[in-house]
Image (cartoon, helix red, strand yellow):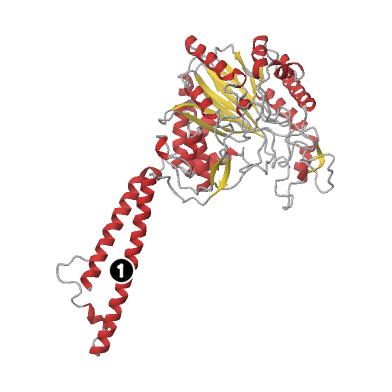
């Protein structure tokens, strides 16, 4: 009996070793080693980097997602977008905004004024869309939208000298109904030039392209060109472009312009409102329709050598995206800037309030070098937080300053110094992406920046996995693999070579474009045959363990029976001779 029991124990032991070694082998890339030291560049180092760049140096502003709400009132109900028709005697909203509401005009006006004060002569101002509010009582029609665009356009034109180009971009809220952009040409897009006031800021050649579908190119005096795209044509909720392979001919136009850039050896900055890929705070549904997302990514990957960088808004958050090919080679990087509106999109999974933000880019004729992020901390300015159950402890002095003076925009951070980057080139952003995987201190700092300083506390493993997957996987199937959604076929797509993802609970799968709850296992998304092997092995181990337990019980009962029969023998005496000399203990 003892011999059989020992044989079972030994086999169980060896099998456990095999299982453990197999698991370590397949998951070695999923668990990072020692974290590198995060090093912030000092002034002398940044000066050396600057001196190594080409002679030309320039700056440009990005302002995005203004969402001016003409119904905002300091007496409005903050639970109803601070609208004046819903007056509330219990709450006084800030003159410059409330985290529960869209932008009031004083905030919009002050943001534009602040840009001109901080840098009055930029090479251009990039205005990346969404100037109308998130309201439905009623939803803004074109009369409201064009009035909004006209006012904001004029405010920018008055703030900057006529020599400073203002480059507007269409956002999904700049149409009625929202998100709906037709394949219509001049009869639709021409109205933004005439009724929206954009003919005052765009040159004639750009206007001619714009009429085709809301896109255009602008040649800067620096030699760089800005390609402004209308990605709302590919936006998933837009139902007006169904069954059209190339809405408004934009793909063909993109290729033509990018080929010209390669042939004539100049660089392109790509600018649009909505990016492809996924929201990094809730990576479940792509922004673009599945018909267009990967086509768009492939188009830009084909010309990564001429693209300096991509610049987007739409998400209201601060992040970036790596555009990679199927073999994991990153070709381009997209930068997402936080919004002017502080609005907390509670119905949107992962939505967050935002401190109103502005971004100043530094660049030369070949490279995006850096950016400086400015924000207006509404809490410091005396604005209530989204938790209306807490007592407002803002002092009367701050309230008074907010009412009688202008808010103070502050330099929140500078990308290159904060993250220790050489520039904003693809190689530098890949290095940052790697460090976000392995250094939790850097990642948690990034997470605070993601909401422009609105503190949500620590990002847990699930949150972190979602962020990193969305940053590193812009294509649909790549993202699904990274997130571990159950319907993907791992064997058909290569993983990114730089991906080392922390563990994650997959809470959703995609069925027909919609998230469906599931109870995915936590951990690395291993190939299915390995999962089957592990499942079988663990089951066998359980069976062997139970068998061993039964045998041990039988042994103990036999011992007790022997004690009763022989009497006077101590239990401990039965251990004598159990392990003969030379026997290897297990």
Q: Is residue 39 visible?
A: no
Q: Relative to 220, does residue 352 appear above or below in the rendering?
A: below
Residue 509 in the image: x percent, y percent?
A: 53, 44
Q: Residue at x 38, y 42 (%)?
A: 29
Give left or right: position of 435 versus 78: left
Residue 321 in the image: x percent, y percent?
A: 52, 32
Point out the residue furthest to the front here: 243
In the rendered image, which quarter is residue 341 located in? top right
Q: Which residue is mark 1?
A: 548
Question: Could you tell me which secondary element the residue under label 1 belongs to?
Answer: helix
Q: Relative to 514, does residue 17 appear above or below in the rendering?
A: below
Residue 71 in the image: x percent, y percent?
A: 81, 35
Q: Is residue 124 visible?
A: yes
Q: Which image quarter is the C terminus in?
A: bottom left
Circle 1 residues within 10 Å: few <14, some 14–19, many ≥20: some
Q: Residue at x 68, y 17 (%)?
A: 185
């Amino acid at each position: 009996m003892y011999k059989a029991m020992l044989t079972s124990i030994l086999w169980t032991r060896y099998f456990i070793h095999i299982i453990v070694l197999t698991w370590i082998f397949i998951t070695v890339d999923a668990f990072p080693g020692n974290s590198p030291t995060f090093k912030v560049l000092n002034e002398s180092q940044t000066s050396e980097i600057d001196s190594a760049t080409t002679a030309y140096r320039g700056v440009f502003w990005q302002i995005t997602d203004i969402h001016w709400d003409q119904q905002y009132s300091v007496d409005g109900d903050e639970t109803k977008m601070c609208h004046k028709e819903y007056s509330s005697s219990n709450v006084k909203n800030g003159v410059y905004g409330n985290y529960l509401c869209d932008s009031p005009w004083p905030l919009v006006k002050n943001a534009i004024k602040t840009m001109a004060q901080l840098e009055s002569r930029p090479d251009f101002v990039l205005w990346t869309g969404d100037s109308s509010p998130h309201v439905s009582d009623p939803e803004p029609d074109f009369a409201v939208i064009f009035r909004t665009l006209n006012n904001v356009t004029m405010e920018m034109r008055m703030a900057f000298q006529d020599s400073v180009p203002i480059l507007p971009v269409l956002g999904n809220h700049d149409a009625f109904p929202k998100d709906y952009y037709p394949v219509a040409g001049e009869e639709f897009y021409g109205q933004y030039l005439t009724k929206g006031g954009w003919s005052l800021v765009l040159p004639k050649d750009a206007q001619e392209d714009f009429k085709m579908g809301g896109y255009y190119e602008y040649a800067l005096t620096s030699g760089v060109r800005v390609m402004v795209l209308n990605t709302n044509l590919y936006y998933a909720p837009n139902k007006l472009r169904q069954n059209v392979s190339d809405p408004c001919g934009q793909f063909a136009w993109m290729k033509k312009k990018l080929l010209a850039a390669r042939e004539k050896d100049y660089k392109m900055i790509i600018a649009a409102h909505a990016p492809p890929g996924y929201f990094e705070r809730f990576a479940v549904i792509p922004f673009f329709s599945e018909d267009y997302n990967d086509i768009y990514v492939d188009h830009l990957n084909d010309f990564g050598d001429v693209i300096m960088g991509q610049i987007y808004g739409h998400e209201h958050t601060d992040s970036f995206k790596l555009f990679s090919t199927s073999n994991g080679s990153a070709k381009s990087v997209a930068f997402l800037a936080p919004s002017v509106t502080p609005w907390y999109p509670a119905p949107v999974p992962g939505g967050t309030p935002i401190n109103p933000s502005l971004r100043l880019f530094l660049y030369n004729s070949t490279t995006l070098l850096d950016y400086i992020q400015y924000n207006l901390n509404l809490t410091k300015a005396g604005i209530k937080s989204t938790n209306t159950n807490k007592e407002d402890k803002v002092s009367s002095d701050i309230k008074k300053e907010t009412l009688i003076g202008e808010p103070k925009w502050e330099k929140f951070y500078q990308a290159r110094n904060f993250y220790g980057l050489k520039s904003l080139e693809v190689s530098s952003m890949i290095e940052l992406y790697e460090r976000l995987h392995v250094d939790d201190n850097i990642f948690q700092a990034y997470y605070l920046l993601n909401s422009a300083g609105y503190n949500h506390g620590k990002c847990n493993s699930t949150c972190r996995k979602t962020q990193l997957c969305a940053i590193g996987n812009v294509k649909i199937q790549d993202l699904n693999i990274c997130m571990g959604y159950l319907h993907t076929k791992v064997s058909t797509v290569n993983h990114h070579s730089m991906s080392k993802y922390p563990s994650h609970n997959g809470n959703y799968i995609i069925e027909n474009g919609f998230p469906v709850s599931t109870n995915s296992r936590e951990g690395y998304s291993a190939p299915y045959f390995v999962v089957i092997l592990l499942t079988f092995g663990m089951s066998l181990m359980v069976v062997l363990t139970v068998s061993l337990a039964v045998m041990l019980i039988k042994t103990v009962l036999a011992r007790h029976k022997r004690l009763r029969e022989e009497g006077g023998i101590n239990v401990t005496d039965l251990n004598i001779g159990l392990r003969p000399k030379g026997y290897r203990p297990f």
